[in-house]
Image (spheres, rainbow, N blue to C red):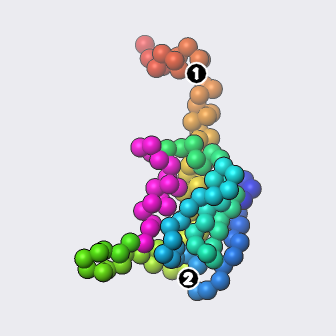
Amino acid sequence: MSGEVGPGGEVAVYECAGARCGSTGTRSMRLVGEGDSVLVVNDRLRLSGVPADAHRYEVNGRTPLGWFIDRYRISTDKESGITNDPNAWFPDEAAFIAAERRIVYLSVEYVRMVDGLSCAFPESERQSGGELG
């Protein structure tokens, strides 16, 4: 995710120790840093360079990265004591990082395409809803 996000985009992995760096552990993933540019996965894994455009694309009021962070939270059912760890489905931290990169890539490319479309229509058509006819 650092630098340009695209087919050749890279992810900067700061600390990764232990066999299961992709598992979030007991603490929720979170975005930190200026412009939410760093995703803290756990105490051992941080992904840096999340571009600002990744936060511009929203689905039902939330970014895809926000949805991912929320859905991949470890939870324990109070009655049964069963722990649900969706991160355990990732075989290693590389698969987890690849999933994050795909989400960021999708968001950035969507914003790039939409920004390109807005230039194709005159301002008057954009404000009126672009009715054809």
Question: Which is more foreground, mark 2 or mark 1?
Answer: 2
Vertical placement of 75 versus 107: above or below? below
For marks 2 and 1, the one nearer the N-term is 2
Residue 130, numbered circle: none
Q: Helix, strand or loop at disc 1?
A: loop
Vertical placement of 91 versus 54: above or below? below
Residue 1, visible in the rendered structure: no
Which residue is at the far front?
78
Of the 4 image quadrants, the one containing the N terminus is bottom right
Residue 64, visible in the rendered structure: yes
Indicate whether residue 67 is drawn in magenta.
Answer: yes
Residue extent of the magenta highlight:
59-74
Q: Residue 24: give x, y in percent of width and height.
A: 52, 73
Q: Looking at the image, how many numbered discs can be counted on the residues?
A: 2
Of the 4 image quadrants, the one containing the C terminus is top left
Vertical placement of 88 versus 12: above or below? below
Instruction: Name the amino acid type tagged 1.
Output: Phe
Q: Mark 1 packing: few (<14 Cα in 10 Å), some, or many (20+)? A: few
Residue located beneath label 2 in the image: 20
Q: Nearer the viewer, residue 78 or 53?
A: 78
Say whether residue 48 is left or right of residue 62: right
Residue located beneath label 1 in the image: 121
Q: Residue 37: give x, y in percent of width and height.
A: 66, 55
